[in-house]
Image: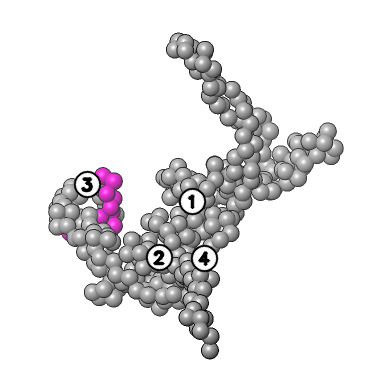
Amino acid sequence: MSNDPEGDVEAPADDTAETDEESADDAESQGFEYGDFVRVEYTARTAEDNHLVDTTDGELAAEEGIDDDEREFGPRTIVLGEGHIFDPVEEALVGTEVGDSGTATVSPEAGFGEYDDDEVRTVSAEKIPEDDRYPGNQVTIDGEQGFVETIIGGRARVDFNHPLAGDTLEYDWEVVGTVDDREERAQELLQTFLDIDLDVHFETDVVEEEQLVEDDEETAADADDEPTYETVEVEQEALYIDATMELTMNQQWMMGKQQIGQQLIDLLDIDRIVVQEVIEGGGLPGMMGGMGGMGGGGGGGDLEAALEDADIDADELAEEIE
């Protein structure tokens, strides 16, 4: 045995590498954060009577007698922190991972609000179309939606509370995936906002932009000088959306186009959105085919014959164009 008093003392183990690995593992296991695109399956019911409020499960909806042919059931994409679902559900999802599931309780305050007796008001029955004057019918009066309770003489009793006001909701949820591809993110957001599927793609465009020319010190000293602008070319990343008939006629799009567009710009980190009209081939029977040669110097295109085949009076058409 060595007489060196330090000879039998073992050096302390180097835990630095192990600590670094644990820190990295902890960082990876923190789960979803606000701003992440998360695909979720969920079912929401009222806590008191177990009434089905919403679900992503088409089979369950059919079993419960919910007939909604216009809706596509399936996982819903939620951008955490953007208010796409009630706050208590978002809070439950933060920190989770794919495969996790759970239940979130949404109080009336966090959901559709407390029931307010003052929101049950008497209005003139004349404000309701005659065919809509019956108990239980949903009506819009002075921009507010409500449900008719009673009709007595020329007066109607209308409840302007949300149908779920005062209800506590229970959300059963499961995280089934994430959305990382940018085009898929754009499509999923449009599906969330408008409930329709649209073709989209990204492009980098070169556009002209007016920019302020910074004055030199001598020019800046003259406060009477007008600011000078110059036209420069800049690159901008754009989301292109095909303006289908389904999009053009969509009420949410017609009423909130600017707001929806701004959300897409912010969430996808792009400069602008281009909605482009797509005209499919076809048209009046026999007309477009007969006019096909007009662009090539009249090679075989007979406009008058095409109009006759389409049963269109050429003189009347000319007058309408003028």
Q: Earlier in the sequence, mark 3 or mark 4?
A: 3
Nearest to the observer: residue 322 or residue 173: 173
Q: Position of residue 190 (x, y in %)?
A: 50, 54
Q: Which residue is mark 2?
A: 94
Q: Position of residue 232 (x, y in %)?
A: 62, 28
The alpha-carbon separation of the residues under discs 4 and 1 comes to 15 Å
Nearest to the observer: residue 154 or residue 293: 293
The alpha-carbon separation of the residues under discs 3 and 4 comes to 51 Å
The alpha-carbon separation of the residues under discs 1 and 3 comes to 45 Å
Marks 3 and 4: which is nearer the front?
4
Q: Position of residue 96 (x, y in %)?
A: 43, 70
**What residue is rendered at 36% in x and 68% in y?**
92
Range drawn in magenta: 137-150
Q: Which residue is mark 4?
A: 178
As helix, strand or loop, the secondary structure at mark 4 comes to strand
Image mark count: 4
**Dot 3: within a 10 Å radius of its alpha carbon, few (fewer than 14), some, or many (20 or more) residues?**
few
Marks 1 and 3: which is nearer the front?
1
**Three-letter amino acid code at the position of disc 1:** Leu
